[in-house]
Image (cartoon, rainbow, N blue to C red):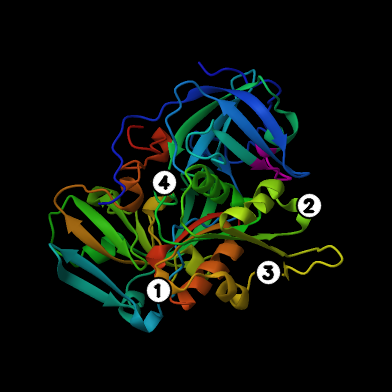
Amino acid sequence: MAGTAVRGRLTWQVATVGEVMTETATARTISLDVPGWEAHRAGQHLDVRLTAEDGYAAERSYSIASAPGEPVAITVQRLEDGEVSPYLTDELRPGDQLELRGPVGGYFVWDGEPEPMLLLAGGSGVVPLRSMLRHRARTGSATPARLLYSVRSLPDVIYRAELDGYGQDGTEVSYTLTKQHPPGWTGNTGRVGQALIEQVAWPVGRRPIAFVCGPTGFVEAVAQGLVTLGYPASRVKTERFGGK
Amino acid sequence: MSPVTRGFHGKRREAGGDRVPPGQYVTEDFPVLSAGPTPHTKEQDWTFSVRRGGKEQKSWTWGELHDLPVEQVTADIHCVTRWSKLDTRWQAVSIDTLLGQVASDAKYLMAFCDGGYTTNLPVADVTGGQAWLAFGYDGKPLAPEHGGPARLLVPHLYFWKSAKWVRGLDLLDRDEPGFWETYGYHMYGDPWREQRYAGD
């Protein structure tokens, strides 16, 4: 079977927080120094464990934001009622220690395949897709790439400067702003519908691969839209988060 | 010994207490996780088959499934992505009822699904009142994104074993990895022993 990964136990490793970058009012990217970190693939995730002074621990999974070959980094969006994300976005600072386990996952990954890639992000679902785009850029890949990023408003765009800089190398990046848009905005607005999917989707004949990541409602609508266009289900890889 | 993460105190949600396996937290939501598009199989096109060596041993249509005794199941479920949901209520037919109509000495099985998903289970874990074929949730038809028309319900194992959109069981002599198991997840998946990944 493809993608078979046989390996030993994934152990918890101590990570030291390096650079911390503010991405938006509610999201930041945390670079982690992990001696002996196994190289990850673009799209994989990892487990984080935080331990309080009395030994109480909390664990969560996060997508890896950095490209293969770069120091491991995660981008965390604060969830209002969260236990772990508010700590990571508001309190954690360089030099702090936490534990990691990973990398994990072998399905929602991009390893440099030549077929056109269609990346569809809803909110912080952009994180693993950003790892893929960085991997593509760092390896000088000629794979055609398009990202459609559905986000509440421009200030909520994670990796804004980096994504806007991709125009020159053949990566096409577009946004659809679902809640608020600035005066004079000529881009897409509102939730992703079938017309917009048809506009950004590569023709089925080019054997494109689609990666869709976001909240459930977004992923359901987009994945169904691609199937309607004739994308085989096996060429639409999804990753979801959030409740109903 | 884990290092202390400076300034982390946690919320210490006590909900659930000893009903929540290690490393899990309780959620009121019902998150959705699946690797691809949601299939939308119509009930009139749906069947559930038990196969052995590629040969069909027994098959039920949607109508035939509903002629079998329906159980009201209340269970706690635990997803490997760390959420647990307590007291979920399902309408389901016991796998005992289905396998009781098939003569077999198989020790393992592979659940197969619309969309191509598979997951492996020991037969001993889907018999003895431990597993169901569920088609209702909270008194309503099971929603497609949650696995409707029907999914497996094997609440004592991590929830990826409760295959969505299930269409049947392949009875096997030997254990083989299914979809996530091939990608490094644990072959068995006991949440109480935190069997998340291969080697745990």
Residue to which mark 2 is pinned: A155
Image height of B93 relative to B63, above or below? above
Q: Which residues are magenta?
A: A76-85
Q: Position of residue A158 (x, y in %)?
A: 69, 48
Residue at image position (55%, 68%) is A222
Give me the C-alpha separation between circle 3 and circle 4.
33 Å
Q: Is residue A200 left or right of residue A180?
A: left
Mark 2 or mark 4, which is nearer to you?
2
Mark 2 or mark 3, which is nearer to you?
2
Q: Are marks 4 and 1 on the same chain?
A: no
Quadrant of the rendering where the C terminus of chain B is positioned: top left
Q: Are marks 3 and 4 on the same chain?
A: no
Residue to which mark 3 is pinned: A191
* Relative depth, front residue between B156 and A225: A225
- N-term-proximal mark, 2 vs 3: 2
Residue to which mark 4 is pinned: B158
The amino acid marked with disc number 1 is: Gly
User: Mark number for residue B154?
Assistant: none
